[in-house]
Image (tube, grey):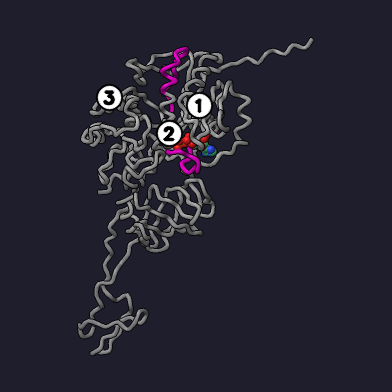
C-alpha cells in the first residue's frame, strides 16, 4: 500500500495576523482593532513589534492613509521587550519564536474583534482578516505599495492560509495579505496613543508646546510639528480613537517622547514598526511610462518657467524626452516658492503621484540636482573708440555707437549671473502636507541607507 506522509510543517514559527479596511471616515481605526486583539488574546506570545504597513497611497478606494496591520504570534524566545501598555498592563514582545501550530483561539479572538469593531455599516469598507503560518512572498508587498493589485493575483494565496474572514467582499484581504508579506528593509517606528472611549469624537487635548519641542528633544523623531502652518502633525483630524502618534527612527526614543507630552488621559499605547517615511511607494520611471494610480520619481530638465494657476497651485513642465506637468498644490505652501524659482534648463528629480486627468505629477519632493547659471544683461557696452554708451540695434544686431558709428556684437553687453533664490538640494512640502510614506529629507540625510554622496553634500551645506 502506498503511504503518503502528511506534509511536515517545518520552520513555520510564526502565526501572522493581517487586518485591513475595518474603518470608515466616521469611526474606528484599524490600528485600534489590532490593539484590541493584543489586549484580548493571551494564548501565544507577540513576536516582534506590531506592524503598521502603508500601501499604495493612490488607491482610489482608500479611506485615509491606506494602512494595513500585521501582528505576529508564536512561542517567544529570547529576551522580551516593551511594546506598549493596555489596560494598565505592560505589553511585551519577543524577538524570535519556536515552532507554532495553527491556533483556533487566536482565530476566534481576531474574528470576534473584527466583527465587533469594524464599521460594517459603511458601504465602502470591506474588512479583511487573515491568519496564516505561511507568509506570502515580499513581492506582494512591493506590488501593493507601488501599484494596484487585482483580486485575481491574490486569490490563489487563500488556499495557503489557515483562516480568513471577508464578511463584505474580498478587497480587505488584499491589504491584509500585503501587510503580512512585508519584509522590513528600510523601516521606522510609530508610537500610537489612544483616547479613553468616552472621549472619542470630541476635541483632543494635547499641549502644543510639548509637541513643538519634540524635534529638538528627540532628534530621531520626524513629522511632529508644522512650524509653517502652526499645526500639530502628530494629532489626527478624524474622529478616530487615536490621540496622537509620534514617528521616528529609534523605537526606544518614542515612548520616552510620548511621556514628555502633556495631554488628556491615555487609554493605551502601542509601538508599531512601520514602512512610513521610507519612499517605498516610489519607482523610478520615465515620463512615457507614467500611468494613473502610481507614484514615481522622474528625472529630467525643466522646459519652461513655472506658472501659477488659479487657487495658488504652481506648475512646471518636466522633460525627459517626453513632457509631464509637475504640480505643487496650494497646501504645500512655502514649497511652492522653491518651485517658482525654477528656470528652463534646470535638472530636477520630481517625486510624486500621478494624476490622470489632466495627466500630471503631484509633487511630494523635489531634488534640484543642477541649477543652470542664468545671466541677465545689466548695461549696454561702451564704445571702444569714444567711450560713450552704445545703443542696441535689435536682438541679433548687436550694438552701434551713434556718434562714431562703431559696432559691437550682442555679447559685448555687460552681464551678471542671476541670483537664483534657491540652491541645489532636496526640498519637501511642510510637515502638514506630507504623505505617510514620503521619506522626510531629515531621514534622507541620516538614515542607515543614506543617499548618494552628492545629495548628502547638498543637504548638509544648504543654508
Ligand atoms: P487607514 O485609514 O487605516 O489609514 P484606509 O482606511 O485609508 O487606511 P482602507 O480602508 O484600508 O484604507 O482601504 C483600502 C482598501 O484597499 C483595502 O480594502 C485594501 O485591501 C485595498 N488595497 C490596499 N492597497 C491596495 C492595492 N495596492 N491594490 C489593491 N487594493 C488595495
Label 1–label 2 contact, CB within 8 A: no
Which numbered marker is on residue 349?
Answer: none
Q: CA distance from mark 2 to mark 3?
A: 28 Å
Which numbered marker is on residue 18?
Answer: 1
Say above or below: 60 vs 300.
above
Badge 1 or badge 2: first in the primary sequence: 1
Whether residue 141 is visible to the viewer of this picture, yes or no, is no
Task: Give me the residue at 36% from left, 34% from top.
Answer: 239
Looking at the picture, tell me which residue is in the foreground, 221 or 299: 221
Looking at the picture, tell me which residue is in the foreground, 181 or 102: 102
Residue 57: in magenta span = yes
- The image shows a total of numbered marks equal to 3
Q: Which residue is mark 3?
A: 265
Task: Give me the residue at 23% from left, 85% from top.
Answer: 385
Whether residue 116 is visible to the viewer of this picture, yes or no, is yes
- Look at the numbered disc 1 and say if its residue's Cβ is closer than 8 Å to ligand 1: no
In terms of image quadrants, where is residue 26? top left
Q: CA distance from mark 1 to mark 3?
A: 29 Å
In terms of image quadrants, where is residue 240? top left
Q: Which residue is mark 2?
A: 275
Circle 1: is it few (<14), some (14-19), or many (20+) Cα within 10 Å? many
Badge 1 or badge 3: first in the primary sequence: 1
> In the image, is 215 to the left or to the right of 108?
left
**Front tag of 1 and 3:** 3
Say above or below: 409 vs 371.
below
**Front tag of 1 and 2:** 1
Query: Residue 197: where, in percent of width, then height?
Result: 35, 25
Q: Which residues are magenta?
A: 35-64
Query: Residue 415: where, in percent of width, then height?
Result: 27, 70
Amino acid at each position: 500500500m502506498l503511504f503518503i506522509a502528511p506534509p511536515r510543517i517545518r520552520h513555520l514559527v510564526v502565526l501572522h495576523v493581517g487586518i485591513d479596511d475595518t474603518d470608515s471616515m466616521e469611526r474606528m481605526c484599524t490600528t485600534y482593532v489590532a490593539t484590541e486583539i493584543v489586549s484580548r488574546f493571551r494564548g501565544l506570545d507577540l513576536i516582534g513589534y506590531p506592524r503598521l504597513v502603508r500601501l499604495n497611497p493612490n488607491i482610489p478606494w482608500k479611506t485615509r492613509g491606506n494602512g494595513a496591520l500585521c501582528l505576529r504570534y508564536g512561542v517567544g524566545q529570547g529576551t522580551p521587550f516593551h511594546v506598549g501598555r493596555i489596560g494598565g498592563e505592560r505589553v511585551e514582545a519577543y524577538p524570535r519564536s519556536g515552532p507554532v501550530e495553527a491556533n483556533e483561539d487566536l482565530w476566534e479572538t481576531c474574528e470576534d474583534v473584527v466583527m465587533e469593531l469594524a464599521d460594517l455599516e459603511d458601504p465602502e469598507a470591506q474588512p479583511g482578516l487573515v491568519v496564516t503560518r505561511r507568509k506570502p512572498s515580499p513581492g506582494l508587498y512591493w506590488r501593493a505599495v507601488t501599484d494596484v493589485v487585482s483580486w485575481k493575483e491574490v486569490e490563489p494565496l487563500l488556499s495557503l492560509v489557515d483562516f480568513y474572514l471577508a464578511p463584505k467582499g474580498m478587497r480587505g484581504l488584499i491589504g491584509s495579505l500585503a501587510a503580512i508579506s512585508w519584509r522590513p528593509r528600510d523601516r521606522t517606528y510609530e508610537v500610537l496613543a489612544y483616547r479613553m472611549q468616552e472621549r472619542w469624537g470630541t476635541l483632543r487635548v494635547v499641549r502644543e508646546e510639548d509637541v513643538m519641542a519634540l524635534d529638538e528633544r528627540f532628534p530621531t523623531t520626524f513629522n511632529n510639528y508644522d512650524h509653517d502652518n502652526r499645526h500639530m502633525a502628530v494629532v489626527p483630524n478624524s474622529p478616530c480613537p487615536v490621540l496622537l502618534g509620534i514617528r521616528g527612527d529609534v523605537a526606544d526614543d518614542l515612548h520616552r517622547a510620548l511621556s514628555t507630552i502633556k495631554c488628556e488621559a491615555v487609554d493605551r499605547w502601542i509601538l508599531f514598526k512601520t514602512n512610513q517615511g521610507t519612499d517605498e511607494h516610489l519607482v523610478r520611471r520615465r515620463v512615457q511610462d507614467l500611468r494613473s494610480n502610481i507614484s514615481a520619481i522622474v528625472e529630467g530638465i525643466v522646459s519652461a518657467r513655472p506658472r501659477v494657476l488659479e487657487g495658488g497651485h504652481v506648475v512646471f513642465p518636466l522633460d525627459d524626452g517626453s513632457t509631464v506637468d509637475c504640480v505643487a498644490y496650494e497646501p504645500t505652501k512655502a514649497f511652492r516658492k522653491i518651485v517658482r524659482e525654477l528656470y528652463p534648463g534646470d535638472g530636477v528629480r520630481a517625486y510624486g503621484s500621478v494624476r490622470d486627468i489632466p495627466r500630471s505629477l503631484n509633487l511630494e519632493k523635489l531634488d534640484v540636482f543642477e541649477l543652470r547659471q542664468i545671466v541677465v544683461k545689466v548695461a549696454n557696452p561702451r564704445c571702444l573708440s569714444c567711450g560713450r554708451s552704445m545703443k542696441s540695434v535689435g536682438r541679433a544686431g548687436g550694438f552701434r555707437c551713434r556718434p562714431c558709428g562703431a559696432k559691437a556684437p550682442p555679447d559685448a553687453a555687460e552681464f551678471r549671473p542671476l541670483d537664483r533664490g534657491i540652491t541645489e538640494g532636496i526640498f519637501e512640502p511642510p510637515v502638514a502636507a506630507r504623505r505617510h510614506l514620503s521619506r522626510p529629507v531629515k531621514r534622507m540625510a541620516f538614515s542607515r541607507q543614506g543617499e548618494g554622496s552628492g545629495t548628502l553634500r547638498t543637504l548638509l551645506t544648504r543654508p
